[in-house]
Image (cartoon, helix red, strand yellow):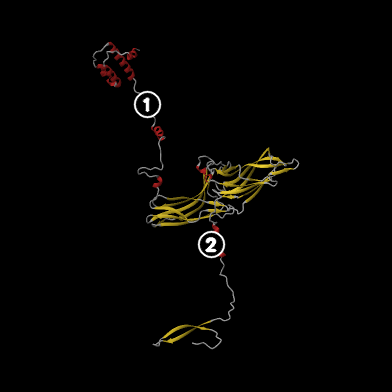
Amino acid sequence: MPHRVVDFFRSPNDSIHNIKASVQRRSNPSSRSASRERPTRHTSPASSVFEAAVDHLQSQIYTAPPVKMAEPPKEKQKDAHSHHRLSFPSLHLGGSKSSKEQQVNPYASLDWKIESPPAVMHGEPENSTGALVSGQLLLDVKEDDFEVENFSGKLEIHVIHKRPFTSHCHNCANQTTEVKTWTFLSEPTILSKRIHEFPFSVLLGGHLPASTDNPLVTIRYDFSAEVTPRTGPVIKLAKNIDVKRSVQVPEQPHHSIRIFPPTNIAASVHFSQVIHPISTNTFTLRLDGIVKHNVDAKSVEYWKLKRLSWKLEENMVTVAPACEKHSPKDPETGLPTKKGLKRTDARTIAHADMHSGWKSDYSPSGCIEMEIQCALPPNAKAACDLKSEDGTEVTHQLVVEMVVVQEYAPTAHPKHITPTGVARILRMHFGVVITERAGLGVSWDNEAPPIYQDVPPSPPSYSCDIPYESVEDLSLSRRSQDAGSGALSPAWEFELEMDEPRGGRNE
């Protein structure tokens, strides 16, 4: 391989012209033959050997055809570039319009106005009379001779399962139940240019569930209306009705007594069974039987309270049904069977720990008394109690836990207290109901006016004898008087006749 040695040991007699020519030949292979034919001056054996080696090397390099790298398909390039593309759905530049804006009818618009009070069901589902919802649909026609082919509306209960029977299945996660439908216009009708009012009303039964949104399920009432004009896109309206339930708060707090054997401790608790979200409630606690006298041992045993904690627990249960596609089929009939999975969830919406704040009395009939503030913070987002026919149920309970330790002291020296090393945990559970506030509203049946059957047929009659000694008499007499021309002019005159003891009447 002599040409490699020549590359490193160039002759000093090489001119700059020869070096430039070799560089040009490397950059432009087509001029290689032309450069060979040109005569060179001041050539030397070393330079000729150098040029021969360079030409041999270039011939080996350029004899091979150029290799073209395979280009990836356009679809792959498009996918690779689209991965880095940023999209802004809410940003529309230039003159482009979204699909929703293009479907707006320029000739009319639809809105609604609710005239009834907020939809609140009063009482338990078994005894509630429901809630009345009434309002008007406002169809604003912006041009004359606007023809409508059909106008209808409906109210549905939409249940969204957040842990459905089958993941990523829309039919398993969404179930709808129709409550009522309205048909405002069933035939083609020409409307004038003004706001047309279409009243609607519905009575929601007391057994229906209230609106809720918890980690397992969402229940909402969807109201939708649709206007089908002869020309132009369909006019749609979609709204939600917030339905609440309010349970009456009892006037007196609930009283519960719990005994904890084998000790003599008895807990007496007064608390309100109905509480409201974002509120503060108070319950009182009293512990009796905390002192025990041992006559034989001449000692006194005490139970001292070291720690008290309370918490509000929320328990949710629901049944996630399967759609027709994912429900198993009956082997005999081949039809899909109704099947669902039970979903449960529990969480703590409020809690607190207390190490002081109670009064202790260790006399022979001593006790421990305290008053506890139970508050629901706004960020807890507590769900109200709920029970529906499809298996969804939300309940709450108040859990109170106390830690007591045992100590003893001689009867002669009650201040010399010695711990026994015995401790117990006292736990109590109380069922409570979290419900919305009723406010100033009352049930719809209490607001209704009286019906005709309740109205008496006539007003009451009065029978009374007036003991008057004398009664004035009224008499009517007609008297004709002649005018100056002899014409008759009738005159009416009232004469008062009274019984007089003397004489007659003067005219």
The answer to whether the residues at label 1 and label 2 have Cβ atoms under 8 Å apart is: no
Instruction: Let me know if residue 338 appears in the view.
Output: no
- Determine the residue positioned at 29% across, 19% down: 23
Q: Is disc 2 surrounded by few (<14), some (14 to 19) or many (20+) residues within 10 Å?
A: few
Residue 219 horizontal/vertical position (percent) = 52, 47
Relative placement, left or right, of 3 versus 476 is left
Cα separation, mark 1 vs mark 2, equals 90 Å
- Determine the residue positioned at 54% across, 57% down: 444
Residue 399's label in the rendered image is none
Compared with 306, 190 (above or below) is: below
Q: What amino acid is at disc 2?
A: Pro
Residue 109 horizontal/vertical position (percent) = 41, 52
Task: Identify the residue at the far top of this view.
Answer: 45
Residue 235 horizontal/vertical position (percent) = 42, 51
Relative placement, left or right, of 300 versus 222 is right
Query: Mark 1 or 2 closer to N-term?
Result: 1
Q: Quadrant of the N terminus?
A: top left
Secondary structure at badge 1 equals: loop
Comparing 185 with 200, the one in front is 200
Q: Is disc 1 surrounded by few (<14), some (14 to 19) or many (20+) residues within 10 Å?
A: few
Instruction: Give the label, 1 or 2, closer to the camera.
Output: 2
Q: Which residue is mark 1?
A: 69
Instruction: Let me know if residue 179 appears in the view.
Output: yes
Comparing 160 with 460, the one in front is 460
- Determine the residue positioned at 39% across, 47% down: 101
Comparing 178 with 237, the one in front is 237
Q: Which residue is mark 2?
A: 449
Secondary structure at badge 2 equals: loop
Q: What amino acid is at disc 1?
A: Met
